[in-house]
Amino acid sequence: MLFKLLVVHFAICSLINVIACDSDVPQLTDDDFETIISQYETSLVMFYAPWCGHCKRLKPDFEKAAQLLSRNDPPIALLKVDCTESGKTTCNNHGVSGYPTLKIFRLGKFVREYSGPRSADGIVKYMKSQVGPGSKELLTVDDLKNFINKDEVVIVGFFKKDTDLKKTFLQVADKLREKISFAHTTVEDILGNFNIKSESIKLYRPKILANKFEPAEIDFTGGDAVFELQSWVKENYHGLVGHRTTENSEDFKSPLVVAYYNVDYIKNPKGTNYWRNRILKVAKQFQGKFNFAISAKDDFQHELNEFGFDYVPSEKPLICARDANKQKFVLKEEFSIETFEQFMNDLLGGKLTPYLKSEEIPSDNSGSVKVAVAKNFDDVVTNNKKDTLIEFYAPWCGHCKKLSPIYDELGEKMKNEDVAIVKMDATANDVPPNFDVRGFPTLYWIPKNSSDKPVRYESGRELDDFIKYIAAHATEELKGYDRNGKAKSLDKDEL
């Protein structure tokens, strides 16, 4: 029935010229949203605004994914709602506050926010994982061959009966289904053809990633605890040198060494593996001490900027690393197996100077609001022997511009106190790792001579708010204000 509904919709769209049917993605309105969405077993709805740039960029991938998923068994519907016109009430009812917002529904009921990739292939894989069991049951030898010949890492469980390990496998498959493909079998013919003598779980790497430095398949040797199997999958999924993309970058943790170059497994797999194999040869020597990955330089230009590169002039890999403390290091010499190996030995031995993105130290820093840059951060903030309030800002940030005159006035109010008022352009300087800056402006309070972590400033941003906070939290009572932030009366001697 569901498939027929989709076919009818696409047929109608091809026969009549209706604005709502300008693509393979049906557009729902306040009048028909509840009725239509309840007919789909599984659906992904994009709540959008026509003027939204992010929505426009997502549109072609969303439409391509809709075409592919309409042929899935069972089919998965991709739908859209215009939050500025015919779908205002629907968007309000579903708490849409930004665009595009994607939500998953089953039989008209909201299930969860979509948190997967925004590419067509990524949307397809993620949404397929939402349908049916977390692990596909394999019934024939051909089923298994087709499954392990995918262009992705897959996990297969081989079981002779319902055991504790099988139960654990199915639990883990359900937990990790959104990112990883799982399958299992109990068919004797399959077990015999693949010489499986006892129950086992195997990880298969795709042929496109085959190399002589690590096995193409790995056997799980742990127990039947869920955390053991889940940890094993995560530790081995990307291999010795993983293909790091914008969609899976969060999987790769420091200490991390990344080789940036023209990584493209679709148009140039041979050239991609030519350099990856050289990375693998060196990485093998440092396995367990560092994590390694390759990344497409064009997809990660923002990261390269953080290492001081506006562009990568060479076709050879550019090696950048972060140690366990998130300090940054760059291979300055042209890449070769020899220079990379030396770089890794020096990195492991602590012989390299970390790269620091920093503006130049101001020639005059005598203002009431001190300017911190990465090069002088310790002097101006950490070791200044004063209580310190620091603002991390961005030059283009409207909220920062609004705060600027208030912050300058605060600096004047505190210039005779044992308090430093400091600001730092967080877009032009590396922010120390103990300051979590994710938006602008972000402010922190650092008591003098304290070994504790900096305290995020969460109070108001008017002048009186700052003064009251500083007066209450200052290590020693301020000269001009009591602990409640009220100005003190001056003694005659001070007049």
Image: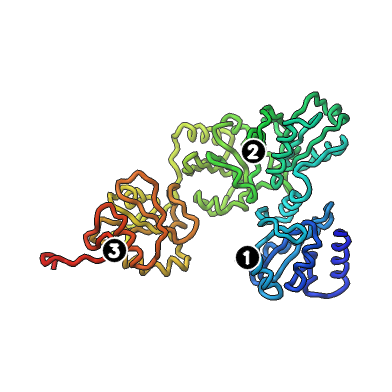
Where does the image place residue 100, in percent across and percent down from the top left? 65, 64
Where does the image place residue 365, in percent across and percent down from the top left? 30, 59
> Observer-nearest residue: 105 or 154?
105
Q: CA distance from mark 2 to mark 3?
A: 52 Å
Colour scheme of the picture: rainbow
Left or right, residue 488 beside residue 338: left
State which quadrant residue 218 falls in. Answer: top right
Q: Quadrant of the C terminus?
A: bottom left
Q: Mark 2 highlights which residue?
A: 234
State which quadrant residue 283 falls in. Answer: top right
The residue under the point 71% across, 29% down is: 219
Where does the image place residue 442, in percent across and percent down from the top left? 44, 58
Q: Nearer the viewer, mark 1 or mark 2?
A: 1
Q: Earlier in the sequence, mark 1 or mark 2?
A: 1
The residue under the point 25% across, 62% down is: 481
> Observer-nearest residue: 168 or 276?
168
Q: CA distance from mark 1 to mark 3?
A: 40 Å
Q: Amino acid at mark 3?
A: Gly
Q: Is residue 367 visible?
A: no
Q: Mark 1 highlights which residue?
A: 95
Q: Earlier in the sequence, mark 2 or mark 3?
A: 2
309 up-or-down from 95: above or below: above
The image's mark for residue 485 is 3
Farthest residue, direction top: 197
**Callout 2: helix, strand or loop?**
helix
Q: Quadrant of the N terminus?
A: bottom right
Q: Amino acid at mark 2?
A: Lys
**Callout 3: helix, strand or loop?**
loop
Q: Amino acid at mark 1?
A: Gly
The image's mark for residue 484 is none
Q: CA distance from mark 1 to mark 2?
A: 34 Å
